[in-house]
Image (cartoon, coloured by chain):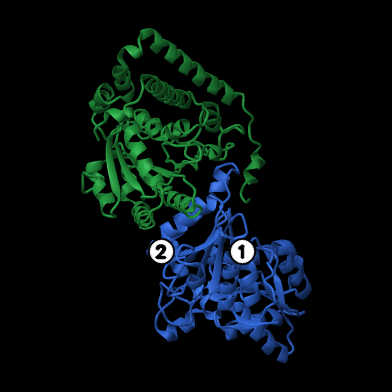
Chain colours: A green, B blue
């Protein structure tokens, strides 16, 4: 969508977006570094390149609006208000982690901030978002439920069942498709017989909005419209954000499935952070950029310290929290 | 004391919960005007309206998943999966979402969802409408599983399911819907993890669930005529399980037969047998017998269906084998 003058944001707001995106970027790079150093266990999926989608969408949400995320979740979590300390401590499996060490990278929760959890099942979070939105509607609460998912998830039954039910019951939900053009290693052309994903929403009579997911201001404008539509009781919106994954599917992915120069080219042309910096022009000169980098680096470093100094779980804690 | 059917017991509980609590609502296929394929929810849409008795598309994943999402927000949805065979279509939402959100979140989330479903053989629908899958759900930490056999238990256990802060899969047996029995004047919640001893006896314990409780009671009558005293224990909830009542009964009778309609192999009865031999091996005078369906899908032709599922004579033969061991 094209940006109207009325949806343009102030330089100050955009600088705060830049800071948040940079924090996510440096956080993710630190995660890669700590994983390679052997500090972190498990299966990690970082969101390098997809920062603008998370920040642009989550900045339109209120604290009591809810999100469901995916296996690639760090950017959504940070953008929805989770502290870097709580996130990093979770990746270290500590008591102080956002899920108390029970979740890990693919199961990050922060209910107080409206984060109903990252979900390791592709498409698995969508039905629950319909249910949350249904609860808001039945209780007359002016809240919105947002599902993040990727292009790969649009091939699941859960996606189709959820969009159908959500539209049928006109619940206040926004379905945000982060189309990064790969389902794990499989490019879109090998997993979808169509190119235009909005046709899938159209099949349910659902409104859709397409946006350049590397342009945070545009994402914010599109999400503002989508969220307002849902909150006003007009039913769900399918928000298609075209984005790019500037790394592999998981940390350590040798990416044998894509040409060697693709990632280099994407980094040169589709990185949302330099793009925002360019847009801001003189608002972010070298000095203020350096200051921003230093501030973000200190926050990320502090999160690692916090996590390393966190409390280890006892093995037998594994038997807690099975039942309420 | 009033006498009501098992079907009415389930319906009465749903109605009473919805009358007293706006957070309780129903979702399922054909549950509104049609009243559900088994007629359990008949009339409820008239009293509570279509907002709270919600007909759904044929979308088992979304039905269960919408229940999960609403439950996390503090509502107490009761979703109906028309046949338990179709619960396979919602297993991801039940097993990977409902059962695990609390755990994965480190205790931040509760999922007070009730999943009602029904099934059972004896009417020749073939292999996709008559299975008994309760054993599958019992294998999932985080879920609770109830399987009432009487109107009183159906009513009281369903209430407890709705007000449990965990997800409960609530099994009803198709052939039990028309059975009638006395219930207390007012609905009394029944605590999970408490077995009911339907009949006391001294020679052999039958641990039975669902339809087989009634089969066991008939077998106990016949056995009594032959001088065999049978105790019939119905766990009522399979997860949590009242191990003590079962073990105490076997310590008294020294013999144990476990029976259910699901296939014997890897069934719920295998777990009961394991618990009994672990906890009171020295009390056993005979090997533990298991009586369930033969290891085949439920066939269509009535003669084959009858062959596959367990009947009174199968249970009686098992009782006699244990008693014959001295």
**Left or right of B1 in this view: A309:** left
Q: Is residue B174 visible to us here? A: yes
Does residue A322 sit above or below B233 in this rendering?
above
**Residue drawn where x is 57% and y is 46% of the image:** B109
User: Is B110 drawn above or below residue B47 in the view shown?
Assistant: above
In the rendered structure, which disc, 2 or 1, sits on the residue that comes first in sequence? 1
Residue A169's spot in the image, x, y percent?
39, 57
Looking at the picture, do discs 2 and 1 lie on one chain? yes
Q: Residue furthest front?
A: A6
**Residue A242 sits in which quadrant?**
top left
The reply to whether callout 2 and callout 1 are in contact (CB within 8 Å) is no
Is B234 situated left or right of B122 in this image?
right
Identify the residue position indicated by label 1 in the image.
Answer: B20
**3D distance between C-alphas at marks 2 and 1:** 24 Å
Q: Looking at the image, which is closer to me, A69 or A170?
A: A170
- Which residue in the structure is indicated by mark 2? B56
State the residue at coordinates (31%, 27%).
Answer: A8
- Percent across and percent down for residue B24 are 55, 61
Q: Give the quadrant of the N terminus of chain B.
A: bottom right
Dot 2 crowding, Cα within 10 Å, few <14, some 14–19, many 20+: many
Which is in the foreground here, disc 2 or disc 1?
A: 1
């Amino acid at each position: 969508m094209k940006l109207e003058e009325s949806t343009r944001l102030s330089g100050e707001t955009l600088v705060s977006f830049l800071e948040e995106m940079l924090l996510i970027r440096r956080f993710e790079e630190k995660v890669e570094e700590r994983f390679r150093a052997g500090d972190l266990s498990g299966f990690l999926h970082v969101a390098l390149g997809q920062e603008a989608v998370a920040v642009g969408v989550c900045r339109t949400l209120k604290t009591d609006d809810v999100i469901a995320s995916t296996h690639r979740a760090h950017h959504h979590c940070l953008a929805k208000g989770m502290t870097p300390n709580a996130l990093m401590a979770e990746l270290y499996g500590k008591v102080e982690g956002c899920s108390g060490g029970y979740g890990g990278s693919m199961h990050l929760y922060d209910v107080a901030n409206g984060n109903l959890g990252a979900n390791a099942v592709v498409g698995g979070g969508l039905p629950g978002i319909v249910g949350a939105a249904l609860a808001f509607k039945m209780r007359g609460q002016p809240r919105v439920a947002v599902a993040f998912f990727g292009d790969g998830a649009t091939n699941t039954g859960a996606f189709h069942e959820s969009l159908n039910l959500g539209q049928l019951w006109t619940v206040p939900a926004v379905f945000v498709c982060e189309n990064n053009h790969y389902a794990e290693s499989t490019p879109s052309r090998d997993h979808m017989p169509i190119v235009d994903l909005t046709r899938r929403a159209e099949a349910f009579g659902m409104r859709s909005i397409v946006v350049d997911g590397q342009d945070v201001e545009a994402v914010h404008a599109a999400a503002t419209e989508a969220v307002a539509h849902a909150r006003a009781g007009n039913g769900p919106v399918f928000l298609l954000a075209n984005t790019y994954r500037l790394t592999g599917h998981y940390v350590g992915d040798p990416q044998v499935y894509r040409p060697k120069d693709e990632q280099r080219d994407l980094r040169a042309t589709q990185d949302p952070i330099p793009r925002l910096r360019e847009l801001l022009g003189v608002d972010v000169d070298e000095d203020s950029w350096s200051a921003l980098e230093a501030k973000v680096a200190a926050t990320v470093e502090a999160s690692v310290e916090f996590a390393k100094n966190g409390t280890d779980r006892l093995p037998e804690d594994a038997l807690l929290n099975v039942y309420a | 004391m009033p006498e009501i059917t098992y079907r009415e017991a389930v319906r009465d509980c749903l109605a009473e919960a919805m009358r007293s609590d706006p957070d309780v609502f129903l979702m399922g296929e054909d549950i509104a005007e049609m009243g559900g394929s088994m007629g359990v929810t008949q009339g409820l849409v008239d009293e509570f309206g279509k907002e709270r008795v919600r007909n759904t598309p044929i979308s088992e994943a979304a039905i269960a998943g919408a229940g999960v999402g609403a439950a996390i927000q503090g509502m107490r949805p009761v979703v109906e999966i028309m046949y338990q065979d179709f619960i396979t279509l919602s297993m991801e939402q039940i097993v990977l979402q409902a059962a695990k959100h609390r755990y994965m979140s480190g205790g931040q989330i509760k999922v007070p969802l009730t999943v009602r479903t029904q099934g059972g053989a004896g009417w020749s629908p073939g292999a996709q409408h008559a299975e008994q899958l309760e054993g599958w759900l019992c294998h999932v930490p985080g879920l609770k599983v109830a399987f009432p056999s009487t109107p009183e238990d159906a009513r009281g256990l369903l209430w407890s399911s709705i007000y449990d802060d965990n997800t409960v899969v609530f099994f009803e047996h198709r052939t039990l819907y028309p059975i009638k029995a006395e219930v207390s004047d007012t609905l009394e919640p029944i605590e999970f993890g408490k077995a009911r001893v339907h009949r006391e006896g001294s020679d052999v314990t039958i641990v039975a669930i669902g339809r087989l409780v009634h089969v066991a009671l008939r077998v106990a009558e016949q056995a009594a005529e032959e001088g065999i005293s049978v105790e019939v224990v119905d766990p009522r909830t399979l997860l949590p399980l009242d191990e003590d009542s079962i073990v105490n009964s076997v310590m008294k009778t020294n013999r144990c037969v476990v029976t259910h309609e699901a296939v014997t192999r890897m069934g719920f009865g295998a777990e009961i047998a394991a618990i009994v031999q672990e906890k009171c091996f020295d009390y056993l005078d005979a090997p533990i017998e298991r009586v369930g369906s033969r290891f085949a899908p439920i066939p269509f032709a009535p003669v084959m269906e009858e062959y596959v599922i367990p009947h009174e004579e199968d249970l009686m033969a098992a009782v006699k084998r244990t008693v014959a061991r001295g």
